[in-house]
Image (spheres, grey):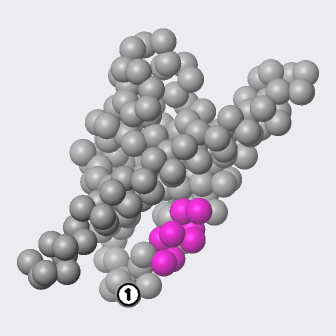
Amino acid sequence: MTVSKLQFGPRIRARNMADDALFEFLHMEIVAHVYKEQATREDIDKERVTCVSTLEAMGFRVGQGLIERFTKDCPTFKDDLDVMKFLCKDFWNTVFKKQIDNLRTNHQGTYVLQDNKFALLTQFSSGKQYLEEAPKYLAFSCGLIRGALSNLGLESVVTAEVSLMPSCKFQVVIQKL
């Protein structure tokens, strides 16, 4: 290890922790703002769909931009599985500071990505009282995945499921054109 890494290591780690906290706080505030903006509407079901769509669209655009930046110097991917492995290891690690815990596939275009300690759900209690609130905090991430895959040439449908906080499963179904 070089002297500069030893000398500045704790400072960089502290800055990364601050960056993580800022990202998590910003995400929570974006979700709150989107839902607050729609709270004036009459139709609650339409409100929920509109909010999820808005958050998913934001995530989609961010995912497109991030994956473009992350893959500019990467060789091309040979198949869908190669893309998904990149997404689970490199992309997830850059965005959420950890890899996906488990990737499963049926080799027919369906992938399940499991994150046992999903960063955007860790600020909530592990109890069941927050389970019904969890989906609104996952819409952005579903869009993030879908946007990243779209920019890599894979159109997909991404859904998320939470059965026990803060664990989350993302199901990705690649659309064959």
* Magenta-highlighted residues: 62-69
- Side of 122 relative to 27 (left or right): left
Name the secondary structure under disc 1.
Answer: loop
Any part of residue 74 in sight? yes
Q: Is residue 125 above or below residue 148?
A: above
Residue topped by disc 1: 73
Magenta run includes residue 63: yes
Image quadrant in which you'd find residue 71 = bottom left
Question: Which residue is located at x 33 percent, y 57 percent?
Answer: 14
Give amino acid for label 1.
Asp
Question: Which residue is located at x 36 percent, y 20 percent?
Answer: 126
Question: Which residue is located at x 53 percent, y 55 percent?
Answer: 144
**x and y, in percent, of residue 151 in the image:** 54, 71
| Residue at the front extreme of this rendering | 7
Image quarter where the N terminus lies is: bottom left
Q: Is residue 51 above or below residue 68?
A: above
Image quadrant in which you'd find residue 132 = top right
**x and y, in percent, of residue 53 in the image:** 70, 43
- Side of 53 relative to 158 (left or right): right
**x and y, in percent, of residue 72 in the image:** 44, 85
Image quadrant in which you'd find residue 165 = top left
Question: Which residue is located at x 48 percent, y 19 percent?
Answer: 131
For label 1, the crowd category at 10 Å Cα-Cα, with few meaning under 14, some 14 to 19 and many 20 or more, is few
